[in-house]
Image (tube, helix red, strand yellow):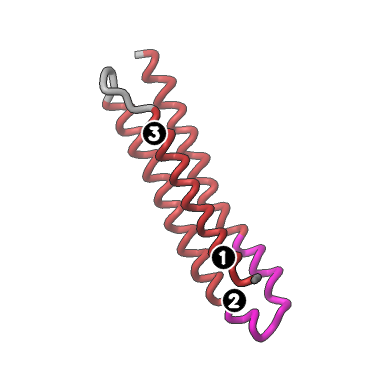
Amino acid sequence: MKSIIPVVMSGIIAVYGLVVSVLIAGGLTPQGYSLFAGFVHLGAGLACGLTGLSAGYAIGIVGESCVRAYVYESKVFVSMVLILIFAEVLGLYGLIVALIMNSRATSLDVCT
């Protein structure tokens, strides 16, 4: 049962992308959508997507090697969870940057 933790943590990364995509889609308007807002939304999506990709890659490598090591030594579990948390934070940083960018695009788009 402990071997499912990397899978759950990689699923959380997908939720980050879903949150950003819903926020970006909510900011789309057919009238008055500036070029600046479009590029900021593109950058926010890329920031979240690329950090999610790197976090998922790190979680996959660490999860695979630590789950294989856990079969032989149960002390590996704590270090596996710690390294997975550090890998998960990469995706969280991308989510934070994307949220800041999205709020900047919507706040400046209203002023223009």
Q: What residue would you read off at disc 1?
A: 6
Q: Say if mark 1 contacts mark 3, CB within 8 Å.
A: no
Q: Say if mark 1 contacts mark 2, CB within 8 Å.
A: yes
Q: Badge 2 local density, few (<14 within 10 Å), some, or many (20+)? A: many
State the predominant SS element of the stretch in magenta. Answer: helix
Q: Which amino acid does the dot numbered 2 rest on? A: Val
Identify which residue is drawn at 37% across, 19% down. 109
Q: Which amino acid does the dot numbered 1 rest on? A: Pro
Q: Nearer the viewer, residue 98 or 6?
A: 6
Using the image, tell me which numbered label, if any, was put on residue 24.
3
- Report helix, strand or loop for mark 3: helix
Task: Tell me the magenta residue range.
Answer: 68-84
Measure the C-alpha gap from mark 1 to mark 2. 9 Å
Q: Badge 3 local density, few (<14 within 10 Å), some, or many (20+)? A: many
Q: How many marks?
A: 3
Residue 77 image point, x, y percent: 68, 72
- Furthest toward the bottom, the residue is 72
Identify which residue is drawn at 31% across, 23% down. 29
- Report helix, strand or loop for mark 2: helix
76 is within the stretch colored magenta: yes
Measure the C-alpha gap from mark 1 to mark 3. 28 Å
